[in-house]
Amino acid sequence: MDNTNWIQIKVDCASGDLDTVSSVMCMISNSLMIEDYSDVDGVLDGVYGDLIDEKILNADRTRSSVSVFVPESSSPAETELFLRERLSSLGVDAEVSHSSVREEDWADSWKKYYKPIRTGNRIVIVPVWETYEAKKGDLIVLMDPGMAFGTGTHETTRLCAALLEDHVTDGCRMIDVGCGSGILAICASKLGAGYCYACDIDPQAIKVARENVVLNKTENVVCEVSDLVKEVDPADADFDVAAVNIVADVIIRLAPDIGRFLKDTATLIVSGIIVERAEETLAALRNAGFEPVRELRENGWYAAALKKA
């Protein structure tokens, strides 16, 4: 008998955003429960109109919802944070909620499954409430993600961190676009970067990122609420490494502009891309003058390091 505890994570949205929300939810699971009443009026004109439940007849036709069910052991709180961040970056106004767990337990329920995680060869992500005996050569990144995405458990973060190991050099300048908990900028600092700029459009994420910077004593990491294209002056940028761990649509949107912030010899690291959209994303980056030098895939996720052609 399966004793797994399942958590329902539900996203309520405008019916016009249903396709976008479903696409993001598919990054978590292909088994979705969709509630959409926008076509009920058409059904009423048919032979089945009299059979429709009154609750459906009275439902708001302008609203839809998508639910996914995840096991408690898979860090559902981080899944919720992932959805909030990705939908926000896409400009989708949606409400993310959860059920099947007591509200007072939600914030901490995932912590018992969050243990030290090795990414790449040297970086070890250690939850602040855990103890870890470092091995020779380990770079320890302490992490308290709070209400921001980025514990190191998600494939997108791990793939990005592994690529940073290959391309961060002593004294380099690094930018983390959509930084969440600040984990990637902190990793870059630990790897020897001289200056790291972590930006996110979510003020709560920046609050958490700044707390993690203090926790890790990485004073060369600067965290700011910022939209890269609109608020960062390329003349002041000139970065050696950029990490963009967001979602395919946003990476495609940023592709024509990201090069203005990078040196000609810089490395662009992208992640948060489901494998089905890898070629589409690569095409946009190639059109912007980038070519991949290393590609990684894990559990349906894709990440790449690219150089200016």
Image (cartoon, rainbow, N blue to C red):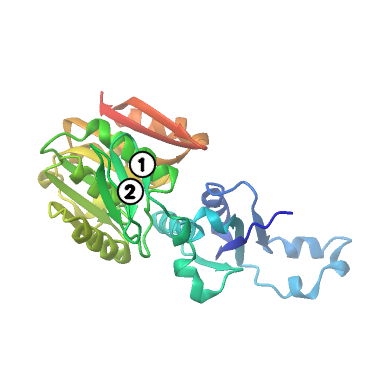
Which residue lies at the image location 42% right of the left edge and 46% below the top edge?
Answer: 247
Q: Position of residue 83 (x, y in %)?
A: 47, 57
Q: Quadrant of the C terminus?
A: top left
- The label shown at residue 91 is none
Which residue lies at the image location 14% right of the left edge and 44% below the top edge?
Answer: 237
Identify the residue position indicated by label 1 in the image: 118
Q: Nearer the viewer, residue 274 or 251?
A: 274
The kind of residue on which mark 1 rests is: Arg
Dot 2 crowding, Cα within 10 Å, few <14, some 14–19, many 20+: many
Q: Is residue 156 above or below residue 265?
A: below
Q: Is residue 111 above or below residue 270?
A: below
Q: Nearer the viewer, residue 220 or 127?
A: 127
Q: Is residue 102 left or right of residue 228?
A: right
What secondary structure is found at the residue carrying circle 1? Answer: strand
Dot 1 crowding, Cα within 10 Å, few <14, some 14–19, many 20+: some
Q: Quadrant of the N terminus?
A: bottom right
Identify the residue position indicated by label 2 in the image: 125
Residue 147 visible at all: yes
- Dot 1 and dot 2 residues touching (CB under 8 Å): yes
Q: Is residue 47 left or right of residue 211?
A: right
Q: Position of residue 159 (x, y in %)?
A: 38, 38
Q: Position of residue 212 (x, y in %)?
A: 25, 59
In 3D space, how far apart are the residues under numbered discs 1 and 2 (Cα atoms)? 6 Å
What secondary structure is found at the residue carrying circle 2? Answer: strand
The kind of residue on which mark 2 rests is: Ile
Which residue lies at the image location 58% right of the left edge and 55% below the top edge?
Answer: 70
Q: Position of residue 179 (x, y in %)?
A: 30, 52
Image quarter of residue 235: top left
For marks 1 and 2, the one nearer the N-term is 1
Residue 251 visible at all: no
Q: Nearer the viewer, residue 291 or 218?
A: 218
